[in-house]
């Protein structure tokens, strides 16, 4: 039994073990099959395996088809960007020709370039250098994109999924098409990469050549600037024609040809800026012509145009003169050849505008100045010096000295109908000093310095006159705008007389900056000045553990200043009502708008300057300590200003009384507000006083006001009849409101009569005084006609009460 039982147990265990192992094998097979099916789409399947489609393989291949299709489309997009290489390929031959030409001239034995020629060459080569550097960066970026794209395409081509045999014919077609597209794209990308690498290498070589040329030219510029302070050529009176290689005429022809090439090369890549300047010129011209047309078709055209001089002479020529004045500033540092060509056109337009407004003697002087300017400009373009050039420079300097002395000695005005500038004498004296220095340098054989100071002298004089006419032309354009749209609704918000006054100051500041920049450029100090300025602003400085640059400080204060300008601009246009009550709603919001501009400007300034927040918190903490010690009143007024802006107990144009002072609100500022009293005085009231003291606002809801006065009737008069006469007179007056109705009240008995109090309302408190006077005259006339003679008051206390307003 035991044996049998053991056999039975053993058989039972064997059956259990068999079932257990069978289960493990089945589970393992299914697991391997599932894993094998999942591994197939992930590049682990040999191409010799043949697998029929199942529920896992087909969806995976469908997803791969979608992913690979997207990748191929992206790669096609990247390859198609080779179109952007066309401008680079087209531009390279001209740039290389330009660089090779400059290299040949520099390496040519005996070839010399003066300072102006070197500066022009540097400008053109730096333009090419910047273009080449941009091309190099773009090609490097494109090359990296192509390399990454080609790597993705190669992954697609090496995917074993394309070798699988699948029963779904549509899926097979899609895989075959993808494989063919990827193979074609791989070939195209390899070809494109070879082309990009070739162009990239070519551009890199050109960059090295441009850098080498810039370095060489900079060295020559420095050498010439050092050498020009020593004697370059024989003294003028010791020089002879044999000391010079070429004559003046040949040098002039060569210089004109070279200047034309320089201008063409420089403007070749500047058509976008030229187009922008031309579009601006068209806009200004159309705007000015439109205003002139409106004025000429108005009733008072002759009177209006009496204040217009240059634009009345010719609107188009005036706009052309302005265009040739501001157009050079569209370019960073143009060559002198372009500047002189631009200045010739500007001088022609300026002469046409200015000539009728010159006195007889000034016309002769102006013709001489123009002729001298042309000679100095031509002399400035010469590549080398000549014997005739030196004597011409000497004679031109003597003539310019004579002209300057004549201008200084001339006691009368040089202009007709045009105000003489206060800076004229200082400008002429500065010109005189420069031309004297030029003559001294020419006499001692320092020709480069003589040309530099001679050109600078005549340029300073002509540019000063040009900027005067330019500023006057801008002011005339603004005046024409104001007169052409005098009756428009927008003009009610703007005081153009005050705008012209402010604009004149701004224009003179800009003109002074332009004149200074031109002087620096004429003295060939533009590049050293900008380099020094850049170093000054970008150099990092330390105060303790805090580091900063003057550039960040300048940005911070510049943005704050710009915020202040915008705030003042908005307040100027919308904060000064010309018509009573027309801008009260807009004016009362000015404080909120200005505070928002200041706050936004401060935040932008902090972000632009790169000030860390921990430093800002330190500054605010220090400011809090300062407020606690001595700025309580200022902060109180600032906070009161904010409360006034939100609560709005007063608005621009309101009639108020506060602290014994009364007047019309003109401005609600951040710290204080301004009111104008009846005598025309401006009263500045701190905002804190407007909230801490009792405030009477006569116009918070409307302009209505009650007016009263007292008259004395004799005792023997028929009181009821007199009262009826006065009431009828009040009711018939159109300047008096009838709701609430006017009232006549018996006030009290006095020694010689009865005091009668007259009360009525008027719709406009600004007319209270005149209306009160008219009503008193009408009542007096009505009572006199009725035979009622008024009695003088018994004492001053019973005299008619005068209105405070």
Image: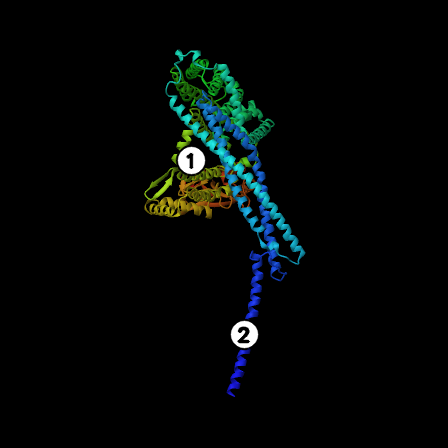
| Location of residue 482 by image quarter | top right
The label on residue 147 is none
Q: Position of residue 600 (x, y in %)?
A: 45, 44
Q: With respect to residue 507, does 616 lie above or below?
A: below
* Nearer the observer, 533 or 261: 261
* Nearer the observer, 443 or 172: 172
Query: Is 378 on the left or on the right of 628, as rendered?
Result: right
Marks 2 and 1, the one that precedes in the sequence: 2
Q: Position of residue 66 (x, y in %)?
A: 61, 53
Going 57% across and 41% down the picture, which residue do you hit? Answer: 192
Q: Quadrant of the C terminus?
A: top left
* Extreme residue in the right direction: 169
Task: Kindly indicate whether the residue at mark 1 contacts the one at mark 2 (C-beta within 8 angstroms).
Answer: no
| Location of residue 46 by image quarter | bottom right
Q: Secondary structure at mark 2?
A: helix
Q: Position of residue 170 (x, y in %)?
A: 67, 55
Residue to which mark 2 is pinned: 20
The label on residue 681 is 1
């Amino acid at each position: 039994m035991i044996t049998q039982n053991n056999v039975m147990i053993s058989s039972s265990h064997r059956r259990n073990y068999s079932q257990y192992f069978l289960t493990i094998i089945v589970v393992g097979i299914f697991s391997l099959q599932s894993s094998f099916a999942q591994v197939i789409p992930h590049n682990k399947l040999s191409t010799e395996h043949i697998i029929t489609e199942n529920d896992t393989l087909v969806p995976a291949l469908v997803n791969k088809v979608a992913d690979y299709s997207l990748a191929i489309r992206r790669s096609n997009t990247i390859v198609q960007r080779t179109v952007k290489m066309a401008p680079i390929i087209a531009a390279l031959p001209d740039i290389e020709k330009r660089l090779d030409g400059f290299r040949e001239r520099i390496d040519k034995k005996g070839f010399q370039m003066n300072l102006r020629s070197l500066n022009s060459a540097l400008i053109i080569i730096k333009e090419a250098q910047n273009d080449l550097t941009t091309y190099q960066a773009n090609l490097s970026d494109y090359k990296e994109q192509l390399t990454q794209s080609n790597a993705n395409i190669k992954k697609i081509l090496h995917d074993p999924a394309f070798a699988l045999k699948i029963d779904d014919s549509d899926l097979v077609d899609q895989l075959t098409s993808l494989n063919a597209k990827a193979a074609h794209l791989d070939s195209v990308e390899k070809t494109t990469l070879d082309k990009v690498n070739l162009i990239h290498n070519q551009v890199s070589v050109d960059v090295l050549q441009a850098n080498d040329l810039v370095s060489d030219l900079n060295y020559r510029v420095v050498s010439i600037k050092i050498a020009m302070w020593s004697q370059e050529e024989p003294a003028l009176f010791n020089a002879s024609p044999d000391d010079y290689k070429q004559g003046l005429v040949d040098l002039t022809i060569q210089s004109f040809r070279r200047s034309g090439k320089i201008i063409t090369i420089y403007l070749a890549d500047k058509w976008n800026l030229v187009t922008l300047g031309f579009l601006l010129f068209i806009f200004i011209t159309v705007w000015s012509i439109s205003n002139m047309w409106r004025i000429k078709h108005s009733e008072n055209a002759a009177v209006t145009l009496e204040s217009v001089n240059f634009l009345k002479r010719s609107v188009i020529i005036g706009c052309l003169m302005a265009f040739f004045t501001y157009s050079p500033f569209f370019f960073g540092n143009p060559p002198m050849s372009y500047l002189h060509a631009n200045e010739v056109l500007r001088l022609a337009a300026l002469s046409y505008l200015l000539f009728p407004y010159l006195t007889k003697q000034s016309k002769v002087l102006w013709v001489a100045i123009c002729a001298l300017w042309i000679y100095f400009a031509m002399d400035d373009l010469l590549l080398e010096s000549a014997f005739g050039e030196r004597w011409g420079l000497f004679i031109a300097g003597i003539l310019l000295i004579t002209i300057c002395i004549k201008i200084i000695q001339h006691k009368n005005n040089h202009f007709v109908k045009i105000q003489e500038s206060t800076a004229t004498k200082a400008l002429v004296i500065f010109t005189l000093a420069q031309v004297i220095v030029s003559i001294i340098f020419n006499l001692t054989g320092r020709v480069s310095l003589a040309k530099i100071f001679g050109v600078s002298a005549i340029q300073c004089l002509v540019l000063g006159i040009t900027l005067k006419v330019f500023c006057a032309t801008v002011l005339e354009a603004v005046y024409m705008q104001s007169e052409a749209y005098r009756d428009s609704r927008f003009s009610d918000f703007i005081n153009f007389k005050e705008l012209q006054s402010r604009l004149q100051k701004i224009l003179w500041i800009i003109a002074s900056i332009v004149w200074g920049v031109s002087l620096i450029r004429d003295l060939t100090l533009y590049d050293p000045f900008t380099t020094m300025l850049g170093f000054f602003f970008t150099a990092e400085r330390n105060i303790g553990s805090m580091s900063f640059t003057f550039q960040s400080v300048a940005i911070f204060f510049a943005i704050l200043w710009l915020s202040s300008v915008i705030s003042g601009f908005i307040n100027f246009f919308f904060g000064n009502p010309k018509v009573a009550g027309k801008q009260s709603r807009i004016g009362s919001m000015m404080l909120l708008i200005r505070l928002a501009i200041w706050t936004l400007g401060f935040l932008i300034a902090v972000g632009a300057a790169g000030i860390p927040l921990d430093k800002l918190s330190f500054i605010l903490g220090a400011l809090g300590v300062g407020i606690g010690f001595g700025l309580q009143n200022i902060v109180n007024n600032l906070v009161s200003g904010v409360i006034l802006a939100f609560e709005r107990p007063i608005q621009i144009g309101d009639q108020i009384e506060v602290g014994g002072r009364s007047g019309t609100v003109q401005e609600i500022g951040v710290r204080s507000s301004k009111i104008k009293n009846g005598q025309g005085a401006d009263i500045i009231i701190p905002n804190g006083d407007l909230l801490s003291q009792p405030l009477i606002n006569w116009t918070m809801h409307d302009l209505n006001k009650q007016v009263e006065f007292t008259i004395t009737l004799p005792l023997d008069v028929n009181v009821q009849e007199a009262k009826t006469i006065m009431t009828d007179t009040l009711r018939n007056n159109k300047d008096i409101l009838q709701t609430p109705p006017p009232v006549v009240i018996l006030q009290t008995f006095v020694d010689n009569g009865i005091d009668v109090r007259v009360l009525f309302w008027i719709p406009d408190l600004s007319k209270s005084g005149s209306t009160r006077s008219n009503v008193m005259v009408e009542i007096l006339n009505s009572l006199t006609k009725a035979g009622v003679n008024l009695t003088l008051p018994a004492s001053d206390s019973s005299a008619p009460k005068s209105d405070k307003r």
